[in-house]
Image (tube, grey):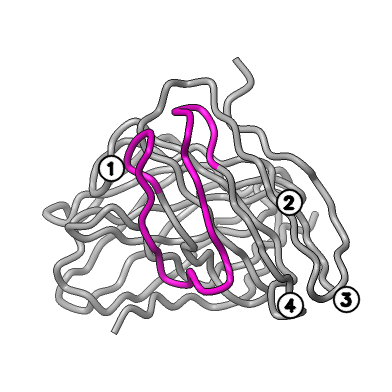
């Protein structure tokens, strides 16, 4: 199947860490991506991880990949109100297409 | 450098009407994509193009047609709009195809309502 699943909502306090989870079904996925969508805007690529990596860190963002469980997570350290958005994970295989997850709405409250 | 632009931003159609959504990019990208986004769902690929003069079907192509006559433009047409096509439509472009580390650049979206 082609399902990429995410929980729909996450609410965190400003300054805390946020962890957004994603599960995918296709073990042949080569790259996995995290996109951010702010209200009324298109998607913006945040980070990506190649399938032979376990972890990638980029400033406040940490991506963890568990290939055995087909589980991907995005951790945002020191979450700020500007991080409030919808976050999509996406996978690509040996095609020209991205398969997107359903999106997780992150709400950051003071 | 405007990136990816979409025209129009909003549109309301009656069932059976036709319209064309225009996507333009000024980054000289080879690949262009049309997605639709529906509540509670991820983006789904409608059609895409791997270069000027080419088009290919995505995940949900029925009811839509596309054309890529110029490298910088990718048009999405609805010949006879249906309420099921009420959605937010996003265009994207990239220099290389997938999989890769090359990002897809997205436009701001077009909100279409079909009554």
* CA distance separating discs 3 and 1: 36 Å
Q: Residue furthest bottom?
A: A1
* CA distance separating discs 1 and 4: 31 Å
Kindly indicate the quadrant of the structure image that contains residue A8: bottom right
Label 2 Cα crowd, 10 Å radius (few <14 / some 14-19 / many 20+): many
Residue B82, numbered circle: 4
Looking at the image, is mark 2 or mark 3 nearer the viewer? 3
Question: N-terminal of the two: label 3 or label 4?
Answer: 4
Give the secondary structure at mark 3: loop
Label 1 Cα crowd, 10 Å radius (few <14 / some 14-19 / many 20+): many
Residue A9, numbered circle: none
Question: N-terminal of the two: label 1 or label 2?
Answer: 1
Main secondary structure of the magenta stretch:
loop
Q: Which residue is mark 3?
A: B115
Q: Label 2 marks which chain's residue?
A: B
* CA distance separating discs 2 and 3: 16 Å
Kindly indicate the quadrant of the structure image that contains residue A73: bottom left
Q: Label 3 marks which chain's residue?
A: B
* CA distance separating discs 1 and 2: 24 Å
Q: Quadrant of the N terminus of chain B?
A: top right
Q: Say whether residue B82 is magenta.
A: no
- Establish if B30 lies above or below A21: above
């Amino acid at each position: 199947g082609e399902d990429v699943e995410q929980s729909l909502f996450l609410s965190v306090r400003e300054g805390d860490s946020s962890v957004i989870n994603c599960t995918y079904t296709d073990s042949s996925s080569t790259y996995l991506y995290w996109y951010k969508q702010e209200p009324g805007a298109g998607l913006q690529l945040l980070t990506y991880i190649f399938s032979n990596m376990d972890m990638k860190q980029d400033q406040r963002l940490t991506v963890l990949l568990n290939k055995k469980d087909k589980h991907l997570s995005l951790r945002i350290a020191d979450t700020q109100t500007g991080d409030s958005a919808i976050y999509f994970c996406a996978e690509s295989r040996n095609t020209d297409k991205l398969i997107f997850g359903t999106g997780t709405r992150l709400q950051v409250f003071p | 450098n405007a990136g990816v632009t979409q025209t129009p931003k909003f549109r309301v159609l009656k069932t059976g009407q036709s319209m064309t959504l225009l996507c333009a990019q000024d980054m000289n990208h080879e690949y262009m994509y049309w997605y639709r986004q529906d509540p509670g769902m991820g983006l789904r690929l409608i059609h895409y193009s791997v270069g000027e003069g080419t088009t290919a079907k995505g995940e949900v192509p029925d009811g839509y047609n596309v054309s890529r006559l110029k490298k910088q433009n990718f048009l999405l047409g609805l010949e006879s709009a249906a309420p099921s096509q009420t959605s937010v439509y996003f265009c994207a472009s990239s220099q290389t195809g997938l999989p890769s580390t090359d990002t897809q650049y997205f436009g701001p979206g077009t909100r279409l309502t079909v009554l």
